[in-house]
Image (cartoon, helix red, strand yellow):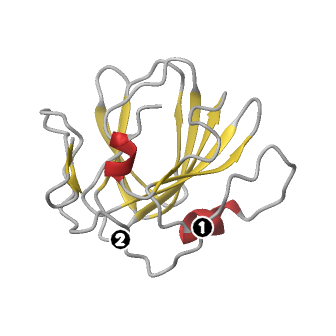
Amino acid sequence: MCNDNNNSCGCGGNSEFSCGCNNNNNSCGCGCNQRSNDLGPNPITVNINQMARSNTDFRNTYWTGENLQVTLMCIPVGCCVGLEIHRDNDQFINIVQGEALVQLGEAQCPRRVGCGNAIIVPAGTWHNITNIGNVPLKLYSIYAPPHHPRGTLHRTKCDAERDLY
């Protein structure tokens, strides 16, 4: 749930795995402002790890095609994506910076992951990612088929929570 009074965001859950973001501006504060427009469906070559590390937006659709989508994410320290399920999308997530606690499936047993770890989430699987490190968590996610509308840009988690596409 987004609290617009101080622009901090929580996951909106009451479980022991819910999280809140106490960062005053809910941004990653990475000091870089490189932004990417959705480059799909054109063919490209890219250093995706470098693009993900330079991203400062909570969610940025980098490339959207007919059958898959690449998004970049920057999750502030202490914040999470929020417990979610994608009924029609498989998801591949690669951590390129930071440490996270990942919850997967019905049991949602937490697992620690870090840079270089991949998370594979089949369609219909509950999941959440929480930044438990001391730096912004940077990752890229591949959805098949695409999940977000082409060109989606959420600078903060609050922006994502307000977006009801």
- Between 45 and 101, which is closer to the camera in this rendering? 45
- 127 lies above or below 24: above
Disc 1/disc 2 C-alpha distance (Å)? 20 Å
Task: Give the residue pinned by disc 2.
Answer: 135
- Between 55 and 156, which is closer to the camera in this rendering? 156
Question: Where residue 72 sits: x, y (%)?
Answer: 56, 54
Which residue is located at x 68 percent, y 60 percent? 48
Which residue is located at x 14 percent, y 33 percent? 15
Position of 62 compared to 110: left or right? right
Residue type highlighted by circle 2: Val
Which residue is located at x 19 percent, y 40 percent? 18
**Regarding mark 1 in the picture, which secondary structure is present there?**
loop
Sequence-wise, the earlier of marks 1 and 2 is 1
- 52 lies above or below 109: below
Quadrant of the image containing the N terminus: top left
Q: Quick one: label 1, few (<14), some, or many (20+) residues within 10 Å?
A: some
